[in-house]
Amino acid sequence: MNSMADDHVPLTIIIFLLCIWTFPIQSTHSATINVWPKPRTFTWSQPTAHLLSPNFTITSPTHLYLSPAVHRYLRLIISEHYRPLVSPSSVDLNTSAPPLHTLSITISDLTAQLHHGVDETYSLTVPSNGGSANITAKTVWGAMRGLETFSQLVWGNPSSVAVGLYVWDSPLYAHRGLMLDTSRNYYGVEDILRTIKAMSENKMNVFHWHITDSHSFPLVVPSEPQLAAKGSYGSNMQYSPAEVAQIVKFGFEHGVRVLPEIDSPGHTGSWAEAYPDIVTCANMFWWPAGTQWEKRLASEPGTGHLNPLKPKTYQVLKNVIRDVTNLFPEPFYHSGADEIIPECWKSDETIQAFLKDNGTLSEVLEIFINSTLPYILSLNRTVVYWEDVLLDDNIHVTTSTLPKENTILQTWNNGHSNTKRIVSSGYRAIVSSSDFYYLDCGHGDFVGNDSQYDNQTGSGQRDGGSWCGPFKTWQTIYNYEIDYGLTEEEAKLVMGGEVALWSEQADPTVLDSRVWPRASAMAESLWSGNRDEKGAKRFAEATDRLNEWRNRMVKRGTAAEPIQPLWCVRNPGMCNTLNSS
Amino acid sequence: MNSMADDHVPLTIIIFLLCIWTFPIQSTHSATINVWPKPRTFTWSQPTAHLLSPNFTITSPTHLYLSPAVHRYLRLIISEHYRPLVSPSSVDLNTSAPPLHTLSITISDLTAQLHHGVDETYSLTVPSNGGSANITAKTVWGAMRGLETFSQLVWGNPSSVAVGLYVWDSPLYAHRGLMLDTSRNYYGVEDILRTIKAMSENKMNVFHWHITDSHSFPLVVPSEPQLAAKGSYGSNMQYSPAEVAQIVKFGFEHGVRVLPEIDSPGHTGSWAEAYPDIVTCANMFWWPAGTQWEKRLASEPGTGHLNPLKPKTYQVLKNVIRDVTNLFPEPFYHSGADEIIPECWKSDETIQAFLKDNGTLSEVLEIFINSTLPYILSLNRTVVYWEDVLLDDNIHVTTSTLPKENTILQTWNNGHSNTKRIVSSGYRAIVSSSDFYYLDCGHGDFVGNDSQYDNQTGSGQRDGGSWCGPFKTWQTIYNYEIDYGLTEEEAKLVMGGEVALWSEQADPTVLDSRVWPRASAMAESLWSGNRDEKGAKRFAEATDRLNEWRNRMVKRGTAAEPIQPLWCVRNPGMCNTLNSS
């Protein structure tokens, strides 16, 4: 759902903008100050900077989550002293003008919850007359976005701040997420917090936590403690309820929802360590020697599906669901439901008997959904599933099983085609196309004993062995239009997107560099788009800005990867091509 | 040149080995202890471990470089307490046996220098009778390899050490290198030291330092200080003579040669900041709009070639060469000579005049080589060039210009084909095939404004835009046979190989994870090969061992990337494929 549908631009702002538009201004999108993601409107008619007062302060209403954010930004703004890679040379730095003393925050609705679609609009004025700067927002979440923007307007030592500017800003898409898989490899709490912090700096708002999978079950579920005790990688590789609470709270303080995913009924091999009787095909070799792909038990090593025909499955699973909804206040609950592999269920005797009685595997899945979805809904949750539950070729349920008002589908296959299948069926969609938004692609395959890599000519390397190769460059991500090919009505059902890091070949050592700044590319594209005022793709202009932003992220503690030689940053335009391939 | 030609296995060792071979032993390559790279022979008939004495010590002859290495390994061995991902369960840990107290090192030639082809052979015995362990080596460099092997035989807390074993080890190839480009992006001294340390742990022995290029000139050359003063990225992004000396010394202490490359006459745009008059096409736009690729001034942004027709070029360059040979005692000097781009030289008036007089660009290059090569040789250096100097289609010199005894060619194009062209011409070759050994490939292109990334279907992504894509997986690197397709005589001219990290999209934030453990794959392949005792490729067995080794590297401070989920490591064989594609 495009959040713009809910935007209400105050009349005073409209009048202000009309006034500006009647006067000649240098540019409504000055390139001399980099803000990432680029605000929707950024008006700075005479690029000027003043000093930031050493006694600079921020005033704001007291709020459980906003107040810590204000405190954090105040510290950052005063102490960051960011040194730009390219100094903003066309800015008139007036050091004799009175320094900026105050940023005042005004919120009209302090009660708005951090839910999908909450108003994140803010306006920011930084006057050049010595008065205080102002952030006006409907919600504290919008104010947090404004604080981030303001922090990026400050640089240097002593600190300078851009003045005489006006920003009105609001996201194009309400759902701007990152999915992290903490099952295949474990990430420490500090890694997750660092990631949420970086998301916030990029105005992203959903940390989709793919907590469990076949490889490990790191979440300590109070009423089912054996799942982590036996299914995690070890007592030092678990997330305790207290740690989850810490992450959730940290998310709120950063305007980032923490959306839990307990993948089921597939991707549950790790559950078998505690409950072998509710998991089919657990701990079996994933793809039997000498068989066709259709005979695999899993699409990658790590087998196991929950058995929908065993009552005990639901005893355990409902305990998990209930505890997870207690641990995560987020109104969405992600239930997975991707990649049901026929042979895994067919390896089980009870399911064999069901099939013998003319049952189908789709019916088995339907039993599972019908036994869990109403329960999740009863806990006041909207359910997110991977698209497979509806779109898988072999095993899927019908739309009648999935209430449109309470079910959201996350797409990952076939690019726009599946997005369209979802929204044209009337479901809301979260876009994570593996062709564009999968951050793990292009690293080859992780499977061992693979002779495809034993060749002595480069031509034998083909696509490098990554099922979703090539590597998704930041440009690939930036340029993707998640509503491409949709009707206007269909496009309204696209809630936003998520980049995803599956962790077969990732863990804390590479987390930052594999996520950033590529996630930043999606963050801007979903916040303010990927086109300039004239409607042309702005990837060339974004390159320079992203270089600068990546550098700032590194200085702030996120080890984002570089996208160009420093020489390119210092020589804007010189590293472009004018002869595109 | 294959170092095996120079190997002399002592008669006592041969007799020892013969004795072992007449008795039934469990395995000459026990899988229960991981050593990376795998030694050539590893005999451990009854896998047993004893405790390491808390007073464990190493005795060795005093030596400028060995002594610090011994001190370092002693500290590591006592304090590492490495906890394996998979405990060596089939090892009989006998805690009541007398702990190992001493490792004694015996060197027969303390004077051997760390030069190409120096004997790195060592033997290591760790007795099970309570006596001291012994490393016997001809040179201190061999002893350092033995120390590394020994350190990998120690694990746990309290420390256990494998006993009752015998290792005889020697590299297949004498040149096992890593090339790092510090011009496109800068790396701090600590990054370089950390890299050399990790190389040493992988028994790699050549740090090929691509110091300068068109983007920046970070090396402070005492007699030409303006080159770095004006051509570096800044005073905090330079390498002072003292820092170079520190790096060189650190290299010696780790058995790693530091081989400097001053790329010329191409890739010298940064020289123009100090000496614009000796550089052609400097600071020009790299590929003029609307022209064919043949009209480019550089193959990537960052233009500039030294002008071979200007006498001043040689005044400056000879100062640089002389100072560099003073800074770097290494007997090899890498002079670059890759990618001479016709239009860059043709943009210069003096060269235009030369061409008008029926000169050719190849003659211009020949003038350059003839004006520099003899000077480099006079400084007692062997010259390394990239293959282009001989093999480039357009601009190259003849073999008569390049004395075979003093010239080495490093290959990077066309895989085996160019290796064969080099060695069949009688030159020694260092293999850095971009199809296999380029660590930067598969990350897309860094050039800005590239519309190839603006497409809305995955199929439009083709190869991902990396000129040398796909990403080179560790398996691709591991399986490459650098002497493939050569005659026995030709193969003797292959000195070894180098993985290479070009830094368009790399800097310290990604250094470790982009290099390791993929460089480890080459390190083993060039040290002891990529085949098992039966001659079969051992990439499946290597997977488990590399997982463990990568983990140990991380614990030692190198942020190597993971290659599999931890689940795979814990469940050996379960993540293999038995149905190769």
Image: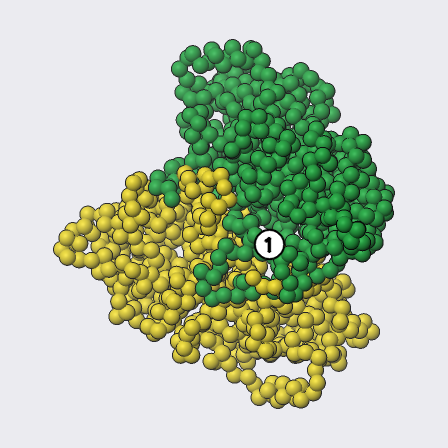
Chain colours: A yellow, B green
Question: Horizontal placement of B298 versus A394: left or right?
Answer: right
Quadrant for the N terminus of chain A, please: bottom left
Left or right: A149 as drawn, with respect to A4? right
Please tell me which residue is depicted at 71% across the width and 79% down the height of the picture: A26
**Dot 1, how many residues are within 10 Å of its Cα: few (below 14), some (14-19), or many (20+)?**
many
Look at mark 1 in the image and give the residue it sits on: A561
- Report the side of A9 relative to B118 (left or right): left
Q: Outermost residue toward the left?
A: A357
Quadrant where the image shows the C terminus of chain A: bottom right
Secondary structure category for the residue under label 1: loop
Q: Nearer the viewer, residue A231 or B257?
A: B257
Q: Position of residue A484 (x, y in %)?
A: 45, 71
Picture coordinates of residue A340 (x, y %)? Answer: 30, 55
Q: Is residue A579 visible?
A: yes
Chain bearing mark 1: A
Identity, as a three-letter code, of the amino acid under mark 1: Glu
For the point 71% across and 19% down, the residue is B110
Q: Quadrant of residue B398?
A: top right
Residue B256 relative to residue B462: left or right: right
Residues A91 and B332: in front is B332
* Image spot of residue B294 (x, y percent): 64, 56
- The residue under the point 82% across, 51% down is B278
